[in-house]
Amino acid sequence: QNREYTVLSDGKKRLSSIDYDAEGRGAYFDPLLYWSAPWTDTARYDNAGSISGWDRRGTDGAAIGFVANGERFEPRYEIDRSTKQLPVLRRTEE
């Protein structure tokens, strides 16, 4: 994951986005421990400064969706380790 933080006016940092596309960036990742996915999640904050949810965008910049904290993204994904190649996130048919 490539995490980006924003520095606030009081000097504190808060998480602004998480890029999950290690494979697309050419970054090393251990496929037995983690996965790569072609999207970035950007945190959405409420007026109190707490994360209220996440906006998800594909590597092409297209919006995939928004999810509030405690909910799941639709569509759903699962890690497929059925081949001898790298694990792949696949869309489920739920």
Image: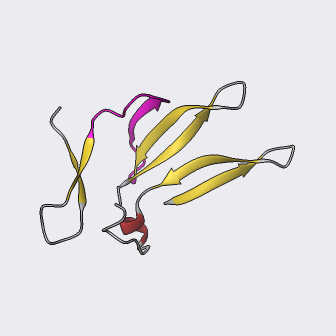
Magenta highlight on residue 46: no
On the rendered structure, is 50 left or right of 43? right
Q: Decide which of 83, 27 is in the foreground and name it.
A: 83
What residue span does the magenta drawing correspond to?
A: 59-76
On the rendered structure, is 46 left or right of 1? right
The total number of labels drawn is: 0
| Image position of 27 with respect to 12: above or below | below
- Residue at the image position 57 percent from the left and 57 percent from the top: 3
Picture coordinates of residue 57, whole percent (x, y) = 42, 44
**Image quadrant occupied by the C terminus:** top left
Picture coordinates of residue 92, whole percent (x, y) = 18, 40
| Image position of 87 with respect to 89: above or below | below
Colour pattern: secondary structure
On the rendered structure, is 38 left or right of 76? right
Q: Main secondary structure of the magenta part?
A: loop
- Residue at the image position 64 percent from the left and 47 percent from the top: 15
- Residue at the image position 31 percent from the left and 68 percent from the top: 32
Magenta highlight on residue 73: yes
- Furthest-left residue in this view: 83
- Residue at the image position 34 percent from the left and 60 percent from the top: 35
Picture coordinates of residue 33, whole percent (x, y) = 36, 65
Q: Decide which of 71, 26 is in the foreground and name it.
A: 71
Picture coordinates of residue 43, whole percent (x, y) = 57, 40
| Image position of 78 with respect to 1: above or below | above
- Furthest-top residue in this view: 47
- Furthest-front residue in this view: 33
